[in-house]
């Protein structure tokens, strides 16, 4: 009898132990699935070309880390002579241009739609809504033609302008403006502030949190654009990092300098990952707010 | 539309919406109209002469087995990614949402890959599975004796593309599922636990139905991702190989337009894709209006 209770106690204990460790084990497997591929490329970026080509490459961290990153940053590869620094500058200009441009243009549009009654208000709202249905991917060639007719191939304006319209940002700001008590705008009127003074001194500062959330999402969106720069940049000095990675990895396997390509890949991940990690709270708020 | 205070100014609102409107018309509406127009013409790529051909671009496309093959692959690809990425992410989100130690560490570790771009995912998986230098390819060949040549074998190519695209999508789904799970009241689950509901009953009868808005939203977003946003992975890993078999619809629009300069056909394909996006968007918004309830 005593033994029986003892046994069932033991079984219950074991069941409890399994229940408690199970989520940890599963989450570690999840993290491993995410992290291992990235470890492989980090390891590759620390070896020589010969070591990688003589597969299998060693999986430790080799001694060539610094020289590989130096070559990537300042020289590029033999088949693609644009250094990472140049491409990083281009990616940064594009990502900042898109994210800041989107925020400014959307704040203005949302301000007009919420705080003014004008005959074309509904028309503007629906015009912005329809852009949701026309992503770049479905209007590749004609948009390319417009850019080329405007002489904007291989320019930053061409990279940025077609991307700075965002229905989601306008909707998010509109939602937020509508939740602000109307007394605030009334008070500013009594104090004699013009609408633009109200916008820049009161409304925009109040919108800090949604703006920060939008910035994180749109910075990543801009940084990770690929199809658009692929279409409109043909000169190496305008390549973004992602285009550069693709160029470095095209050609015969033996001619590819894998260690430099992988160093570049890691460097290309760094800025958007930093933005997400540093602004994680705003990022999650922004992601789940824009859903509606 | 809104009950917000309204300023009186006749010109100012137009100035405020002007930048948005100008960009929408120049870079969205004008090109979309061009695509529709172009889809009824044949253009000779050198002279630029346009010949009106009516629906011929469309009928040629719909009679082309290559187009249907591309359509089938795109659908299969999108469905596999959606099912794979959503299942894994939901499972991980449930684990991370439990009251366990290091929960916030786990969450951060699973959220940051959101920032990894689709092209980078393609580059990483290409490197691991490259038949000549890849670490995993080496293992497949020498440990498991698989004849790993994804550029010659459709099944292998499809598998590799799906793995890369799913891997990239995990963090996105994780963020939404986690937020959805956190909005399920803990008291509700505790009450069910006290009433003796087993973990699986608690999941299927309480948590899953309450997650349905999130699940539906993610379903649409994952399908859109699989259909339209995986271009970089295809372009990086297979370029449509073997043959044209992994060239999804978006890849085909690009190749037919940019490489083959068959502008009429490319435009017709763009129009068909536009219709698909419009249908998905309308579907999603109609649905959100009614909001899935439990």
Image (tube, grey):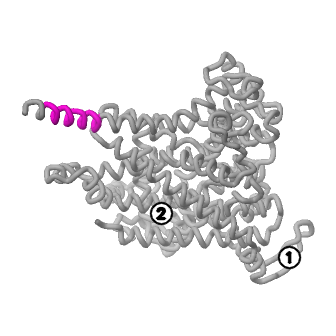
Q: Looking at this view, is A115 or B47 the one in front? A: B47
Q: Is residue A100 left or right of residue B209?
A: right
Specify few, some or many for label 2: CA neighbours under 10 Å numbering under 14, 14-19, or 20 or more. Answer: many
Q: Are marks 2 and 1 in contact (CB under 8 Å)?
A: no
Which quarter of the picture shows residue B57? bottom right
Task: Name which residue lies at 33% across and 56% down.
Answer: A180
Which secondary structure lies at badge 2?
helix
Q: Which residues are magenta?
A: A6-20
Single out the mark in the foreground, 2 or 1: 1
Residue A92 is at least partly visible in this image: no
Foreground residue among A160 and A53: A53
Circle number at residue A112: 2
Query: Residue A41: percent from the left, percent from the top?
Result: 63, 31
Residue displayed at 67% across by 63% down: B249
Classify the position of the N terminus of chain A by image quarter: top left
> Residue, x 47% and y 60% (percent of image)?
B219
Asked if labels 2 and 1 share a chain, the reply is no
> Picture quarter containing residue A53?
top right
Residue at numbered disc 1: B50
In this rendering, the answer to whether A271 lies above or below B204 is above
């Amino acid at each position: 009898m005593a033994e029986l209770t003892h046994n069932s106690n033991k079984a219950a204990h074991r069941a409890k132990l399994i229940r408690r460790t199970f989520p940890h084990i599963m989450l570690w497997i999840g993290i491993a699935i995410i992290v291992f591929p990235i470890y492989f490329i980090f390891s590759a970026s620390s070896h020589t070309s010969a070591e990688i080509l003589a597969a299998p490459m060693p999986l430790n961290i080799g001694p060539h880390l610094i020289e590989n990153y130096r070559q990537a940053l300042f020289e590029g590869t033999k088949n693609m002579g644009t250094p990472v620094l140049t491409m990083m500058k281009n990616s940064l200009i594009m990502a900042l241009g898109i994210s800041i441009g989107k925020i400014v243009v959307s704040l203005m549009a949302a301000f007009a739609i919420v705080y003014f009654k004008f005959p074309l208000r509904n028309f503007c709202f629906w015009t912005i809504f329809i852009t949701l249905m026309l992503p770049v991917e479905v209007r590749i060639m004609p948009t390319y033609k417009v850019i080329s007719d405007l002489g904007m191939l291989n320019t930053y304006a061409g990279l940025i302008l077609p991307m700075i319209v965002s229905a989601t940002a306008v909707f998010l700001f509109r939602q937020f403006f509508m939740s602000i008590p109307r007394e605030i705008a009334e008070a500013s009127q009594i104090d004699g502030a013009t609408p633009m003074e109200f916008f820049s001194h009161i409304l925009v500062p109040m919108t800090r949190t949604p703006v920060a959330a939008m910035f994180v999402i749109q910075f990543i969106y801009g940084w990770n654009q690929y199809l658009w720069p692929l279409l409109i940049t043909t000169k190496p000095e305008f390549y973004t990092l992602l285009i550069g990675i693709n160029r470095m990895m095209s050609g015969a396997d033996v001619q590819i300098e894998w260690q430099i390509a992988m160093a570049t890949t890691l460097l290309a991940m760094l800025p958007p990952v930093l933005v997400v990690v540093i602004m994680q709270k705003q990022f999650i708020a922004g992601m789940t707010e824009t859903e509606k | 539309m809104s009950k917000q205070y309204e300023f009186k100014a006749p010109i100012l609102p137009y100035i405020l919406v002007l930048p948005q409107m100008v960009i929408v018309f120049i870079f969205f509406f004008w090109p979309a109209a061009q695509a529709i127009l172009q889809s009824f013409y044949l253009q000779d790529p050198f002279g630029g002469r346009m010949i009106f051909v009516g629906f011929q671009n469309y009928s040629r496309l719909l009679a082309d087995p290559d187009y249907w093959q591309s359509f089938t692959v795109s659908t299969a690809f999108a469905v596999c990614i959606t099912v794979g990425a959503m299942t894994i992410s939901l499972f991980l989100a449930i684990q991370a949402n439990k009251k366990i130690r290091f929960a916030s560490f786990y969450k951060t570790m699973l959220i940051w890959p959101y920032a990894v771009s689709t092209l980078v995912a393609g580059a990483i998986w290409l490197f691991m599975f490259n038949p000549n230098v890849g670490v995993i390819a080496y293992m497949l060949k020498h440990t498991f004796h698989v004849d790993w040549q994804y550029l010659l074998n459709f099944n292998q190519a499809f598998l590799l593309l799906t793995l890369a695209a799913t891997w990239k999508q995990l963090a996105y789904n994780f963020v939404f599922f986690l937020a959805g799970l956190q909005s399920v009241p803990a008291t509700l689950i505790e009450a069910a636990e006290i009433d003796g509901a087993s973990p699986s009953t608690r999941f299927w009868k309480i948590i899953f139905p309450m997650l349905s808005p999130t699940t539906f939203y993610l379903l649409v977003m994952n399908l859109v991702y699989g259909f339209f946003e995986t271009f970089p992975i295809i372009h990086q890993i297979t370029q449509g190989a073997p043959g044209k078999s992994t060239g999804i619809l978006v890849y085909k629009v690009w190749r037919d337009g940019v490489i083959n300069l068959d502008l009429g056909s490319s435009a017709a394909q763009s129009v068909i894709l536009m219709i698909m996006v419009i249908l998905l968007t309308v579907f999603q918004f109609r649905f959100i209006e009614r909001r899935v309830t439990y």
